[in-house]
Amino acid sequence: MVVIIDPQNAGIAGNMVIGALLDLGADVQDAREIMEYYASYFGEIQVKINKIQKSGISATYVDVKCQDNDSIKYNELLERLDGIRHENVTSDIMDFAKKVFHILAEAESRVHGTSLDKVHFHEVGAADAVADIMGAAYCFHHLKLDLQKIYGMPVALGGGRNETSHGSMSIPAPATLEILKNIPVFGGPINKELTTPTGAALLRNMVQEFCDFYPLITNRRVGYGAGKIDLPFPNTLRILTGDSPTRTDRVSILETNLDNITGEVLGHSFGSLMNAGALDVSIIPTVTKKNRPGHLLRVITKPEDSLTVSEAIIRETGTLGVRTLPYVHRDIAERKIIPIEMDMDGVKFKIRIKVGLIGEEIINIAPEYEDAKKISKKTGIPLKNIMKRANIEFKRIMDNEY
C-alpha cells in the first residue's frame, strides 16, 4: 500500500491529521478515549468528533477543548508520559509520539537558542498538544500506516501575522519553519496560519519522501480532516491510500564533464566509483567547451552516499566540480530470481532467471549472466545460445504452470 499526505489545500494541524485518519477508518471511540485519557494528566480536556462540511467537502472534524494553556518543560512532559499506561497504546505508538515531541522541542530550542531541558511547550496547552499527538499516533498505527510507504506533498503555510507570547509575528511561526526545513512549502493562499508546529512535526515524522506531484498510484480510499475556521475554499487535509504497481525510492545523480583524462584513468574510475557506493556509472561521449571531444560521467547513488561518491569522482578524475541532483524519484519494477534447470545435450544445468514484474504481469526476463557464462565455458556452446535456450525453457515452464 502507498499513502499520500496532501497539505497543499489548507496546510496541516494536529486535529486535521487525526480527522483524516479517522475518515480513513481508524476507530473513533478508541481515538477519543486515548486523547482524553492521556491529556487529562496535563489539564482538563474535552474531545468531540463529528462529520461536517467544509465548502461542500465532507470531512471529519476533531474539536479539542482545553480549559487552560499551562506550559510544561519537555523533560517533565516525557517523564509524565512514561508513567501513563493504556491497553491500546503500544510501545510503537508511544515511541512515535515521543519522536513528534522531540521534533517540536528541537525546533523550539533552535529558535530560542537554548538546550532541550529548558524548552517549554507554551504556545498551546500541554493537554492540547498531548491530545493531538497521542490521537494521531494511535490512528496512524491502528491503520498500520507505519508499515507503508508514505509520500508528502508541498505544504501550504498561509500568511499574515499572528499574536504570540513573543508579540505579533509573521506567519508561519518560527518553530514551524524550523520543523519544515528541507521540505517543500509555499506561502498562502490566504492570510491565516494554515500549518501549525504540531501539524508540521507530525508530517515530518510520518513522511518518507516528498514530491511535487502525486506518484503513480491506484487510489483506494481518501480521508478528509477538517480545520477549525471557515475559509473561501475547503479547509481540509487530504490523506489517500492506494496501491502502486511499482516500488519507488530516491536516488541522487552526480555528473561532471571530462575532456583531459585518458581512457585508462576513465576505465579505472568506473570500478573505483562502484566501490565507493555508486549504484550505476555511465560514461557518455560528448563535446565539451572549445569543441573538445570529451566524456560526460554520470553516476547514480543513494542520497546518503552522494557526498562520499562525489569526493571519489574528484579524487579519481581530477575534475574541479561535480553537479548534483540531490533527490530524484525512481520507479522500480518488482524483481524476482527464479532458478530453473535446463538440459544441454543430455547434461542438466541450473541457471537463475531474473524476472521483472508490474503487479502480476511479467514485463521482462533475463538469464543470469554469470550462470550462463559458466555453462558456456563448460559446454563450449556460445553464450548467446545459452541465453536464448534459457529464455525458451523459462517460457515453457511458465506456460505449463499457468
Image: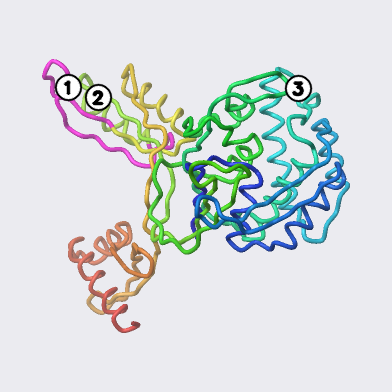
Residue located at (56% from left, 32% from top): 192
Residue 127 picture location, percent across and down = 80, 42
Crowd tier of the residue under label 2, counting other residues whose Cα lies within 10 Å: few below 14, some 14–19, many 20 or above: many
How far is mark 2 from mark 3, CA to CA?
A: 46 Å
Question: Is residue 172 positioned above or below 327 on the image?
Answer: above
Secondary structure, mark 1, is loop
Name the one closer to the observer, 372 or 65.
Answer: 65
Q: Which mark is residue 257?
A: 2
Name the one closer to the observer, 285 or 87.
Answer: 87
Q: Is residue 292 magenta?
A: yes
Residue type pointed to by label 1: Thr
Q: Which residues are magenta?
A: 274-297
| Number of numbered discs visible in the structure rendering | 3
Residue located at (41% from left, 57% from top): 217
Q: Which residue is mark 1?
A: 288
Q: Nearer the viewer, mark 1 or mark 3?
A: 3
Q: N-terminal of the two: label 1 or label 3?
A: 3
Residue 388 picture location, percent across and down = 20, 67
Q: Which residue is mark 3?
A: 115
Taking 346 as reference, is 304 left or right?
right
